[in-house]
Image (spheres, helix red, strand yellow):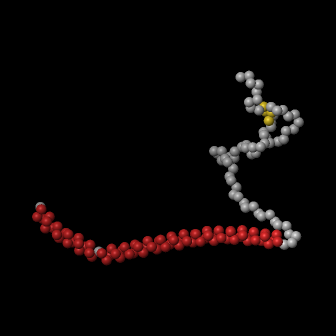
Amino acid sequence: MKKIFFRMLPVVATGVVLTACNNAEEVKKQTDEQNAKIQSLVDEKLAGLQTEADAACTALVDSLATAKYDEWVLAEESKKPGAKPKPKPKPQEPKKPEPTVGDGKPKMGNKDEKTVGDGKPKMGNTDSKTVGTGKPKMGTGTGDK
């Protein structure tokens, strides 16, 4: 068994070496093709990102230029004799969504912390123990306990 193995080993090794040498050009060709495909994908992705960045930059420059132009127009109008300067428009802040309870309904109360009760002014018979709707204040009992 060992004799057969030792006789077949050089033949198999020679076959492997010859096969590997013949495929070197083919492997190089495949590698070059794969590298070209990868490079084209990278170029496409880079071009897309560059376009996106250019659009964002253009929008920012346009908004800043418009703001500066508006300020300049206001300054020019205020230089005219007898002209009153117009107030600058306030930048609009995005509205914050109302806080909601678990099912999405808006929370009740806490509209104005400075008002007491239902927020209506007290009229006539004011009692120091009542607040807003006439209900007694909490903790102002007779202290029987």
Picture mark count: 0
Residue 69 on image: x %, y %? 73, 71
| Quadrant (top left/top right/bottom left/bottom right) for the C terminus | top right
Q: Is residue 88 above or below residue 129?
A: below
In the visual, does 96 lie left or right of 44? right
- Out of 104 and 130, give the one closest to the viewer: 130
In the visual, does 13 lie left or right of 98? left
In the visual, does 19 lie left or right of 73? left
Occupied quadrant, residue 124? top right
Q: Residue furthest top?
A: 144
Residue 122 on image: x %, y %? 85, 38
User: Which residue lies at the image location 78% right of the left edge and 69% below the top edge?
Assistant: 74
User: Which residue lies at the image location 20% right of the left edge and 69% below the top edge?
Assistant: 13
- Out of 38 and 138, give the one closest to the viewer: 138
- Out of 43 and 90, give the one closest to the viewer: 90
Residue 87 on image: x %, y %? 80, 63
| Quadrant (top left/top right/bottom left/bottom right) for the N terminus | bottom left
Residue 101 on image: x %, y %? 66, 45
- Out of 86 and 44, give the one closest to the viewer: 86
Q: Is residue 7 above or below residue 110?
A: below
Occupied quadrant, residue 55? bottom right
In the visual, does 77 lie left or right of 106? right
User: Which residue lies at the image location 78% right of the left edge and 70% below the top edge?
Assistant: 75
